[in-house]
Image (spheres, grey):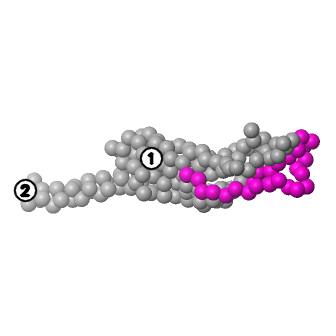
């Protein structure tokens, strides 16, 4: 090949290599899915891709803008008093973890909640139970600034009756 023909070919190859490298480091979530356990905890499962082959681990954070739990006192006969000793707690939740990256991607789960009942306590002769939990505004974020909304959102337990020690 003549030297004049090599220059355009080299320039084209340089552009192709640079574009390929640029595409390899394009973080994005493939999915972010919420599920809720019978005990009221939220599990957000995710797959983050486009992290580049040089990355060995990445920090992922799940954020919940509103986690609302209802706690209620029940007597030893299995009834809640007419006075309705009940407390609704609402708070934001967040949890982070480091996940291994293989072939430029990672898959994992983070678990949060339910919100604590705080200082709410039952009088003597009654027991505290978690009655329901609702999570809304759930998202995942990675250390590169990539975020995704998790679905379904909101997600709730419906009526549950979990004894709290």
- Whether residue 47 can be seen here: no
Residue 3, given in percent of the width and then of the height, sits at 7, 56
Q: Observer-nearest residue: 98 or 127?
A: 127
Residues packed near mark 1 inside 10 Å, few (<14), some (14 to 19) or many (20 plus): few
Q: Which element is circle 2 on?
A: loop
Q: Who's the residue at 39% across and 49% down the image? A: 51
Seen at 85% across and 55% down, the residue is: 84
Residue on which the image places disc 2: 2
**Which badge, 2 or 1, is on the more N-terminal residue?**
2
Residue 151 covered by magenta stretch:
no
Camera-side residue of 92 and 102: 92
The residue at the point 65 percent across, 56 percent down is: 67
Relative placement, left or right, of 47 versus 80 is left
Relative horizontal placement of residue 155, taking residue 162 as reference (left or right): left
Q: Quadrant of residue 124?
A: top right
Bounds of the magenta segment = 70-94
Q: From the viewer's perspective, is the residue at label 2 or at label 1 nearer?
A: 1
């Amino acid at each position: 090949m003549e030297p004049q023909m090599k220059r355009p070919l080299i320039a084209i190859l340089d552009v192709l290599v640079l574009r390929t490298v640029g595409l390899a480091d394009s973080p994005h979530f493939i999915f972010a899915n919420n599920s809720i356990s019978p005990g009221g905890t939220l599990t957000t499962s995710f797959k983050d891709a486009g992290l580049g082959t040089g990355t060995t681990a990445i920090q992922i954070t799940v954020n919940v803008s509103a986690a609302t739990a209802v706690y209620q006192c029940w007597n030893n006969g299995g009834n809640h008093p007419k006075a309705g000793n009940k407390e609704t707690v609402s708070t934001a939740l967040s949890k982070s973890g480091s996940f291994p990256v293989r072939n430029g991607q990672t898959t994992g789960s983070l678990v949060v909640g339910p919100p604590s009942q705080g200082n709410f306590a039952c009088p003597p002769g009654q027991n505290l139970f978690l009655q329901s939990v609702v999570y809304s505004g759930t998202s995942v974020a990675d250390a590169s600034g990539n975020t995704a909304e998790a679905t379904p959102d909101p997600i709730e337990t419906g009526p549950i009756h979990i004894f709290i020690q």
